Image (spheres, rainbow, N blue to C red):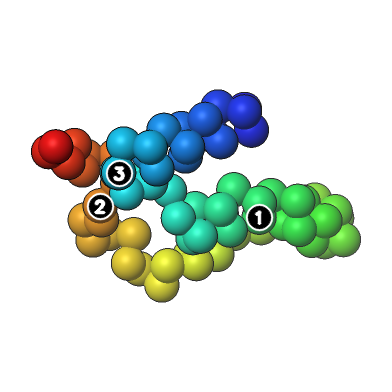
Amino acid sequence: MDYIMLFRLMRCIQLGLVPYFDVYDAATWTSPVPLSHASIKAHGAPQEIPDFTRGLWKKKRDGVDSPRPKG
């Protein structure tokens, strides 16, 4: 999966598109490891994934639906 994500990032850069993921997505994707550790320490209690965007995920952002630049 890492190869696909890196390929897509490079493709966005080559085409002049805004990548469809950002630092908040990266934080969310890497959160299962520390959350799993916290769950194990809490005897298997579910852990909530933090909202790293503080609610900004609800707003539209450039990325996947960005138009391709002309030229």
Q: In the image shown, does 39 or 69 lie closer to the viewer?
A: 69
Residue 65 x/y as whole percent: 21, 39
Q: On the picture, is 65 further left or further right than 45?
A: left
Residue drawn at x 32%, y 49% is 18
Q: Which residue is mark 3?
A: 16
Question: Which quadrant would the C terminus be assigned to in this image?
Answer: top left
**Label 2 sits on what residue type?**
Asp
Q: Which residue is mark 1?
A: 31
Q: On the picture, is 19 further left or further right than 28?
A: left
Residue drawn at x 52%, y 30% is 7
Q: In the image shown, does 7 or 61 lie closer to the viewer?
A: 7
**Label 3 sits on what residue type?**
Gly
Question: Which quadrant would the N terminus be assigned to in this image?
Answer: top right
Q: Is residue 2 above or below residue 16?
A: above
User: Which circle, 3 or 2, is nearer the viewer?
Assistant: 3
Q: Secondary structure at mark 2?
A: loop
* Number of marks: 3
Q: Callout 3: few (<14), some (14-19), or many (20+) C-alpha neighbours within 10 Å?
A: few
Q: In the image shown, does 59 or 38 lie closer to the viewer?
A: 59
Q: Secondary structure at mark 1?
A: loop
Q: Which residue is mark 2?
A: 62
Determine which quarter of the picture holds residue 58.
Answer: bottom left
Q: Are marks 1 and 3 in contact (CB under 8 Å)?
A: no
1 or 2: tag closer to the N-terminus: 1
Inter-mark Cα distance, 3 to 2: 12 Å
Residue drawn at x 30%, y 44% is 16
**Label 1 sits on what residue type?**
Ser
Q: On the picture, is 8 further left or further right than 70?
A: right
